[in-house]
Amino acid sequence: MPQESVRREHYVGILLAYVEAINPTDAERIEMGIVTQESLDSGRTKPVNYREEDGRYRIDFWLKGKDESGRDVRVRHSLFVKNEDARPSTVGNIQVINQQGKTAYIPQVFFEKGKSPYEDWFSAPFQRARVGEAELLHFVNAWMNKKTEDKAVVLDFASISKGNLKQLHQILQSDKASYVKIMLGVRIADDGRRFQTVFPRLVMPSWTINYERLHKELVNYLSNAQSRNDYGVTPDMVYDRKLYRLRVYDEVVTTSNSSNMVHSNMQEPISQLDLPITSMHDEDLPF
């Protein structure tokens, strides 16, 4: 019997994407083609569970865009939230969030006085950030195309951290939801398997055309972490917008006998950055 094969690509670079789903149920995952009923019935795929053992709640944003040839590119961006104060920094500074959704770590004395030591870019009033709150707020602001000076979306964080995602689903179904730009990379596991991943530190509104801030964040991350993630950028690279154009990193061919063949395919950058900005009404993937 001839073997059936499935080709999948890993990408690096910036993808313009919309939110396809948030924490889909098993039935919705089957409909999306993420899992099959057979894999669930056989136990090869575990039923979805968004509650972590440490009490954090995982929010999976399933994002979808297209490459130059029109092929769908789907990734999962996971955030973890808990209705507890975020941990202080290593030097004891407290993480706070202001009305624009910006976050900073400030000394205890400034927190107690309600004053910011960084008035040139981070203004009071502010409040203490909870676990994952800054990351979630940052994503939602980008998703709703908020400008830097705009007031941030007011989220019912306590309710969300308990698993009530009604507010997020309302945004998904509204005309306020737009595209976001995310940085894709490839994580290489110890056994050599490769996973599509998303750079977690910066999600950008769809109108972003300058990626110098992303470059700074990425270079800083790669310089200070022993990361297995490859974003097609190295710490010694000088900023160039072309570094962030979406391109195929490699191609994985899965045959019916479950063997994988990986073909390196770092082709010329392809443009995904200049698509029209249109409102949309409507961490790692193992491929």
Image (spheres, grey):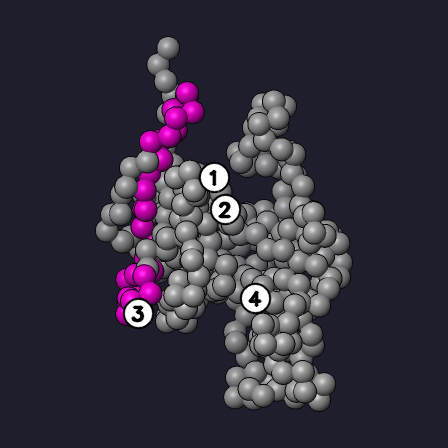
Where residue 174 sits in the image (x, y, percent)? Answer: 62, 57
Look at mark 4 in the image and give the residue it sits on. 138
Q: Is residue 134 above or below residue 189?
A: below
Mark 2 / mark 4, whichever is N-terminal = 4
| Inter-mark Cα distance, 1 to 2 | 7 Å
* 246 inside magenta stretch: yes
Q: Which residue is mark 1?
A: 286
Mark 4 lies on a secondary structure that is: helix
Q: Earlier in the sequence, mark 4 or mark 1?
A: 4
- Residue 28 forms part of the magenta stretch: no
Coordinates of residue 254 in the picture (x, y in percent): 39, 28
Residue linked to disc 3: 239
**Which disc number belongs to residue 284?**
2
Mark 3: which secondary structure? loop
- Work out how far the residue at label 1 is from the one at label 3, CA to CA, in angstroms: 30 Å
In this rendering, would 98 be left or right of 255?
A: right
Which quadrant of the rendered structure holds the C terminus?
top left
Residue kind at label 1, given as amino acid type: Pro
